[in-house]
Amino acid sequence: MACFLVPAAEAVVTKVAEVSVGQEKKKNSFVSRLSWLRNMLLGGSVLLAFEHVWHGEITPFFPFLTAMSSKADAAEMFKEMGTVGVSMALLITGVWVMMVKAADRILAREEKR
C-alpha cells in the first residue's frame, strides 16, 4: 500500500546527509558514495509508486492512498510500512554497503598494480 514511502524517506535523509557532510567526501568512501544509495532508494521507490498507481492504490485525489479511507485500512498500511517498507530499505542499504566495500577492494587492487 505505502511501503515505498519508507525507502523514499530514507533517500531524503540520505540527500540531507550528503549535503551536510560536504567536505568529508574525500576522506570516507561511504560518504563519497551516498549518491549511490540515494539513487538506489529513489529508483526503487519510484518503481513501487508506479506499481501502486497501476493497481489503483494511489489516486490523484485526497487522501491519495486508498488505504487511508478508513482507520482499519490505515492501521494495516502502517503495519505494512513498518514491516515491508523497513525491510526493503534495510535490504537496499545492505546491498549498498556491499557495493561500497567491493568498489574499495577493486580500487585498492588497482592501486597496487
Image: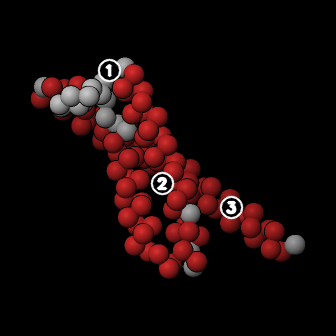
The residue under label 3 is 103
Crowd around label 1: few <14 · some 14–19 · many ≥20 (10 Å): few
Amino acid at the residue labelled 1: Gly
Please state the total of marks drawn on the protein image.
3
Left or right, 90 with reference to 113: left
Q: Is residue 30 above or below residue 99?
A: below
Q: Quadrant of residue 81?
A: top left
Task: Please tell me which residue lies in front, 79 or 39.
Answer: 39
The residue furthest front is: 60
Measure the alpha-carbon separation of dots 3 and 1: 40 Å
Residue 91, image x and y in percent? 49, 46
Left or right, 41 with reference to 5: right
Measure the alpha-carbon separation of dots 2 and 3: 17 Å
Left or right, 34 with reference to 68: right
Q: Are marks 2 and 3 in contact (CB under 8 Å)?
A: no
The residue under label 2 is 38
Left or right, 86 with reference to 65: right
Q: Secondary structure at mark 3?
A: helix
The residue under label 1 is 56
The residue furthest top is: 55
Q: Secondary structure at mark 1?
A: loop
Task: Name the front one of labels 3 and 1.
Answer: 1
Q: Secondary structure at mark 2?
A: helix
Crowd around label 2: few <14 · some 14–19 · many ≥20 (10 Å): many
Amino acid at the residue labelled 3: Ala
Residue 33, image x and y in percent? 56, 63
